Image (tube, rainbow, N blue to C red):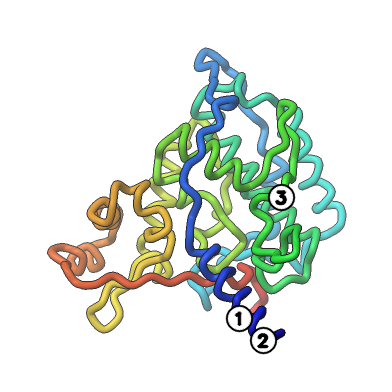
Amino acid sequence: MTRFFFAVFLSFFGFALHAAPSPDYWSYWDRADDDSGVVVDHQQWQDFLDDYVTPSAAYDMFMVEYGRVKRDDKKALDDYLQQLARLDPRKLSRDEQLAYWINIYNALTVDLILDYYPVKSITRLGKGWFRMGPWRDELITIAGQSVSLHDIEHRILRPIWNNPRVHYALNCASIGCPDLLPRVYQGSTINRQLEVAARRFINQDKGAEFIDGRLMLSSIFDWYEDDFVGEDGVLEELKLFARTELKQQLDGYDGRISYRYNWKLNEYRPE
């Protein structure tokens, strides 16, 4: 009986991880002041990234040295999140808002990992008996609203901006995610930064790779295929940012596509 329920749990858990939620528009946040000259200060987050995000040759990606984070730096990260929580992003310009939400999503994720560190995967966290991850847990209060990571991604960023490139900027503390890049997002440069993030992810093996002639993609392109306007949209997106060799392989490709994702913690350990 115990084995039966364990098998059911694994089946349900696997399905839940691979069934991305549809956008769920939260109208409360769909307001901006494009005449606003306010520039949000993300320096504390930048200081953290400078100290603890490092390139890993083994994985060809940027990873986080969670085990080396000092108590004072964890407190500074908490202070940064509270600083953002005291702002009302609806009073910012659209580009400044976009940078705000991406930075707060990534900083909340790192902060959450540090709260429970050591942990092998973010999927081990979360409230409730099944513990399929912390994404629906309310983590912060902004402008009087309790907000979760799920809210930021699926109720704010995806439906309000309708820009699939936000998927390249959000980091879920996993190896399969787009990297947590070592520069904060800024409203003044947000569109260029999203293109840089897209180019980086698509040209990493975890983004797109041919193995024995078959195209292997990140599961992100499966889960959020509709955000890219279907499978053809995904392939056009890949070709737009692919380097020469990958683009040549993609041109005219009409074979099967497989998907994969690595939920292991994106933790850097000295090689």
> Regarding mark 2 in the picture, which secondary structure is present there?
helix
- Residue 58 to residue 91: above or below: below
Is the residue marked by circle 3 packed among few (<14), some (14-19), or many (20+) residues within 10 Å?
Answer: some
CA–CA distance in space, label 2 to label 1? 6 Å
Please state the horizontal and vertical placement of residue 222, each as a whole percent of the image.
38, 60
> Regarding mark 1 in the picture, which secondary structure is present there?
helix
Quadrant containing the C terminus in the rendered view: bottom right
Disc 2 + disc 1, Cβ < 8 Å: yes
Q: Residue at x 72, y 42 (%)?
A: 44
CA–CA distance in space, label 3 to label 2? 28 Å
From the image, tell me which residue sits under label 1.
Answer: 7
From the image, tell me which residue sits under label 3.
Answer: 137
CA–CA distance in space, label 1 to label 3? 25 Å
Amino acid under label 3?
Asp
Residue situated in front as seen by the camera: 140 or 242: 140
Q: Quadrant of residue 63?
A: bottom right
- Residue 12 to residue 135: above or below: below
Please state the horizontal and vertical placement of residue 163, each as a whole percent of the image.
40, 40
Disc 3 + disc 2, Cβ < 8 Å: no
Q: Earlier in the sequence, mark 1 or mark 3?
A: 1
Q: Earlier in the sequence, mark 3 or mark 2?
A: 2
From the image, tell me which residue sits under label 2.
Answer: 3
